[in-house]
Image (tube, rainbow, N blue to C red):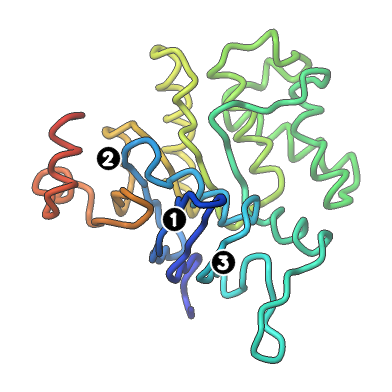
Amino acid sequence: MSGLMLRADKVCKSFGRLDVLCGVDLEVAPREVVCIIGPSGSGKSTFLRCINHLEKVSAGELWVDGELVGYRQAGGKLQELRDNEICRKRSEIGMVFQRFNLFPHMTVLQNVIEAPVRVKRQERGAAVDRARTLIDRVGLSDKLDWYPNQLSGGQQQRVAIARALAMEPKLMLFDEPTSALDPELVGEVLEVMRRLADDGMTMIVVTHEMGFAREVANRAVFMDGGVVVEEGEPRAFFASPQHPRTQQFLSKIL
């Protein structure tokens, strides 16, 4: 695990009789941007949710920055962490969802400082100062006192990114962050993500934005049937995929 930000080792996840993840193996280095693509139902979003223990794996192991996700090893067995330990570990992993999940009764500034103050027990003044910096970073410094329903979808998603960054995560997960946006708003969110990548943030991005994957990612990963089918350097991956299933998928969307 030395030097890895993420290691997934034969990760499986089932919901009753439905097998969604069937042995996912993946490694991600610090500062790496990995884009995961694939058809609906291939397990991409479930895999992200397992990384921060929003879903418990059915088998296999997930490690983030050298530590097991959701469990500790004791006496040769895995023991699930207590809820407060899980919350503390989860706070180190930022996640941006398809839907923005902002608190509708809170302003932009209040949304961004909520978790640092309540979860990390940051002093409010320090949390506000950092929030202002992050909100400016996503281009919304003139919207501090606006409420979510006063913002466009792209602006709401940028607030969601600032909110995740406010927890100072070591890893950022993006679950199709532009899929709920009108086409003309997609670019403003992708531009914020590009800048994050340029700044060295470790990112795992589930996306249908193939241009972003080709231009920004260090590695593209194709999932289907709950497993990683193929991965590679993006330009080669998109220009000459090796696996027939990857070829079939890309031929339909490019």
**Structural distance between the alpha carbons of marks 3 and 2:** 26 Å
Pair 3/2: label in front: 3
Residue 23 falls left or right of residue 128: left
Question: Where is mark 3, residue-wise?
Answer: 64
The numbered mark, 3 or 1, whose residue comes first in the sequence reads 1
Residue 40 falls left or right of residue 2: left
Label disc, if present, on residue 21 of the rendered structure: 1
Q: Give the crowd class for mark 2: few <14, some 14-19, many >=20 residues within 10 Å.
A: few
Towards the viewer: 66 or 163: 66
Q: What amino acid is found at the position of numbered circle 1 in the picture?
A: Leu
The residue at the point 40 percent across, 22 percent down is: 187
In the picture shown, does residue 61 fall above or below 48? below
Towards the viewer: 95 or 245: 245
In which quarter of the view is residue 28 placed? bottom left
The residue at the point 82 percent across, 36 percent down is: 114
**Structural distance between the alpha carbons of marks 3 and 1:** 18 Å
Label disc, if present, on residue 215 of the rendered structure: 2
The residue at the point 48 percent across, 62 percent down is: 12
Pair 1/2: label in front: 1
Please tell me whether mark 2 sits on a helix, a strand or a loop: helix
In the picture shown, does residue 254 fall above or below 34? above
Residue 247 falls left or right of residue 202: left
